[in-house]
Structure formats: C-alpha cells, structure tokens
Image: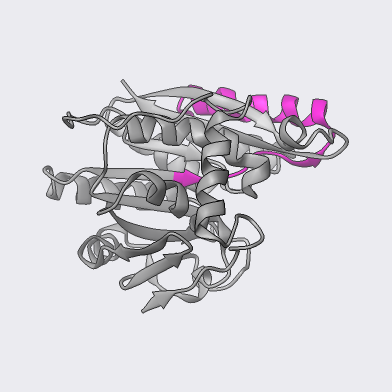
Amino acid sequence: MKRMPAVAGSFYESDADELRKRIEWSFKHPVGPGKLPELPKVKGKRDNLFFVVPHAGYIYSGPVAAHSYYYLASEGQPDVVIILGPNHTGLGSYVSIWPEGEWETPLGDVKVNKEISMELVQYGQVIDIDERAHLYEHSIEVQIPFLQYFFKDFQIVPIVIGLQTPEISEFIAEGILKVMQKHPDMDIVVLSSSDMNHYDPYDVTYKKDQMAIEKIESLDYKGLYEVVEDKDVTLCGFGPIMVSMILARKLGKKAYILKHATSGDTSGDKSSVVGYLAARFGS
C-alpha cells in the first residue's frame, strides 16, 4: 500500500532539491524562526510531545510551521509521528487511519507503523481503517517533507478526522495515551494539523484567532469547540488540536504559543487572509 503525493507541485515543490530549499526558506524567513535547528548529538528525554502545525501552501504557512519543527528537531528524531489532520474532502469515515505501507513525497518514502495503527484502531474505538479519506487530503501530506528534511528512520501514523467533536477527540486522545503507556520506550510525537480562521480581512482574522488561541493556552478544549461553533471562527482542524489539548491535560503539559501569523504576513495581501498557528505542549 503506497500513498502517492496529492499536492506536490501545488502546496510545495515537486522537485526534491527545490523542496529542500523551500523548507530552508521557511526557517530563515522573517516570519520563521530565523535559522535552522541543530539536532542534538546525544538524544535526551523529549519534553514537547504534542504540536500544532498549519497545513497551507509552504509559501504561505511554511514559516509558521517551521517554529514547531524547530522545537521538534531540537529534541531529536522521534520513532513514530502520529499526524492528525481534518478531512477537507468529505471522503471516508468519521475518523480514518491509513494502516500500513508507505507514503511517498519528493524526498522519498516514509513507512506507516502498522503495529501502532492497529493498536489505535483497537484502543481509540472511533477510528476506522479507511484509505479513501487520505487519497486527496493535504493536511497530513504537507507535514511529511518537513520531517524528512531532518529525520531518516522515523515512521508515521496518519489519521484524518471528519467528525470534529469533543467526544470524538476524547476517544482518540485516550487511544493515543494507551499506546504511549504500552510503549514507554518508544519516542512518540503527535502533530495536530490545522489552519486558523479563513478568508476574513487581516484585522478580523487576528481577533477571531485570538479567541481560539486563548482557549488553546488554557487547555480548554471544550471552550475551543464553543468558540468555533458560536463565534464564527473558521478554524478547520479543531478536532486534531483538541486531541493534543486533551493529551497535554492528561500528562501535565502546558501550551506554549510559538508563532501566530497569517497569509497576509507572508504574501502581503491582507484583504482576505488565513490564520496560521505553531504551538507546542511541554513543561
């Protein structure tokens, strides 16, 4: 089972060398961290287990995403990266996992950890084996080249969430926690892929995003859901973010906002923008 890239050549470069240059550009951009991270010579215990990352085209959201990858890479190569993304296509089940095989990008192939995938199906209760949701979905795919730029022998577990409710996120988080407890020697990281408010003017998006960011900082995942539902904040991956917030609460982690910006900050057009957030959950 090989999942072919769906958005290479549109969301990011299809040529491997140009893609590497784009990732480096993301880190060195004024909106980015300003430099590439240094991987540790001796890997210690990871503090930051859960991250929020955006998933737009790299020219728009790459510099913001780079802030999360800066922290991730600075703590060394993980064994498994569970990548949670929203379902933009409407295909597949309410919660769909790609169970095994490989995902291809211009930077090579990455293996899916079948053992962890099957355990998540068992423990998560709401997770179905369903490849259809993944075929054209970009929210997970665009994370993989960032990981490949730094790491060689990691594996992934891709999960697309179509039904985004606090209850669904609680089931998924409980499944991930059980897997982490079952494999205490395995370095597992969770990426929650989401963009923030969509297609309002710059000032409006900043205000709407701030309402969501306040809930994320306080780990109030039900409050985040209410902001999205009641305040017309068109944050697309609130389900994945709620999973990381629940896990952070269970493991005593705090939320740290690394960077908040919009497509207007990278493209210059502030008439209609999309918000982007990088965040980590650690000590």
Give the image location of residue 216, x and y in percent: 51, 28
For the C terminus, the quadrant is: top left
Q: Residue at x 49, y 30 (%)?
A: 67
Q: For this rendering, which residue is in front, 256 or 3?
A: 3
The colour scheme used here is one colour
Q: Residue at x 16, y 44 (%)?
A: 181
| Looking at the image, residue 211 lies above or below residue 178 | above
Q: Residue at x 12, y 43 (%)?
A: 184
Over which residues does the magenta segment extend? Answer: 192-220
Give the image location of residue 10, x and y in percent: 67, 60
Give the image location of residue 18, x and y in percent: 56, 52
Q: Is residue 19 left or right of residue 56?
A: left
Q: Is residue 257 left or right of residue 211?
A: left
Q: Is residue 128 left or right of residue 4?
A: left
Give the image location of residue 259, x and y in percent: 56, 25
Asked whether residue 221 is in view, the answer is yes
Q: Name the quadrant containing residue 47.
A: top left
Asked whether residue 97 is in view, the answer is no
| Looking at the image, residue 176 lies above or below residue 214 | below
| Looking at the image, residue 198 lies above or below residue 14 | above
Q: Is residue 14 left or right of residue 186?
A: right
Based on the picture, tell me whether residue 219 belongs to the magenta stretch: yes
For the N terminus, the quadrant is: bottom left
